[in-house]
Image (cartoon, rainbow, N blue to C red):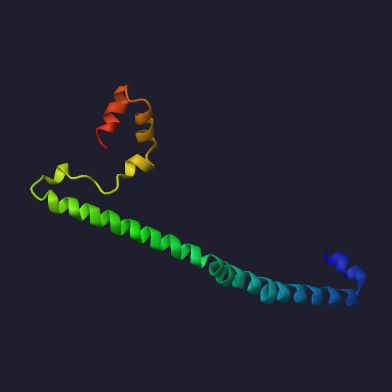
């Protein structure tokens, strides 16, 4: 590419240098600025109402679950902690082995896995 620029002369090299600098400045100051404004301002503004409604639904659900859990605790103060129901049972939702054990309950491995939930 140096030989290509040498054969086209000094005027072409200056124009090429000017075009490279202009392209770099446009890329930095216009394209990147627009991308930052779009991703950090416009998109969050567009979805903020939906995120706030989802957040309030989650908070209301957690408050309701905690209130129900607290009421059950007040009624069952004399019970052992080990017999207490869990508020959220993560293996039922996150572990594939639990779902497979529910699908095939007669297998020995399924019985072992279901003893933990």
Instruction: Please name whichever residue, 8 or 84, is drawn nearer the observer in this view of the structure.
Output: 84
Residue 90 lies, with reference to residue 10, above or below; the image says: above
Residue at 47 percent of width and 63 percent of height: 51
Quadrant assignment, res 85: top left
Instruction: Please name whichever residue, 23 or 80, is drawn nearer the observer in this view of the structure.
Output: 80
Instruction: Quarter of the image for the C terminus: give it.
Output: top left
Across and down, in percent, residue 59 comes to 35, 61
Across and down, in percent, residue 93 comes to 37, 42
Report the residue that reaches farthest toward the left: 78
Instruction: Quarter of the image for the N terminus: give it.
Output: bottom right
Residue at 53 percent of width and 68 percent of height: 44
Across and down, in percent, residue 92 comes to 34, 40
Residue 14 lies, with reference to residue 109, above or below; the image says: below
Left or right? Give the position of 91 relative to 5.
left
Residue 10 lies, with reference to residue 79, above or below; the image says: below
Residue at 70 percent of width and 72 percent of height: 27
Please count the marks in the image: 0
Quadrant assignment, res 18: bottom right
Report the residue that reaches farthest toward the right: 8
Across and down, in percent, residue 60 comes to 34, 60
Quadrant assignment, res 116: top left
Instruction: Please name whichever residue, 72 or 44, is drawn nearer the observer in this view of the structure.
Output: 72
Residue 49 lies, with reference to residue 77, above or below; the image says: below
Residue at 44 percent of width and 63 percent of height: 53
Left or right? Give the position of 34 relative to 7.
left
């Amino acid at each position: 590419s140096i030989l290509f620029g040498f054969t086209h002369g000094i005027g072409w090299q200056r124009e090429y240098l000017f075009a490279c600098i202009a392209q770099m400045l446009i890329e930095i100051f216009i394209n990147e600025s627009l991308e930052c404004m779009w991703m950090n301002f416009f998109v969050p503004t567009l979805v903020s109402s939906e995120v706030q409604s989802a957040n309030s639904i989650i908070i209301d659900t957690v408050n309701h679950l905690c209130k129900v859990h607290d009421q059950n605790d007040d009624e069952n103060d004399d019970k052992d902690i080990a017999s207490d129901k869990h508020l959220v049972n993560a293996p039922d939702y996150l572990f594939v082995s639990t779902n497979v054990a529910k699908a095939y309950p007669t297998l020995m491995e399924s019985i072992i896995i279901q003893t933990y939930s």
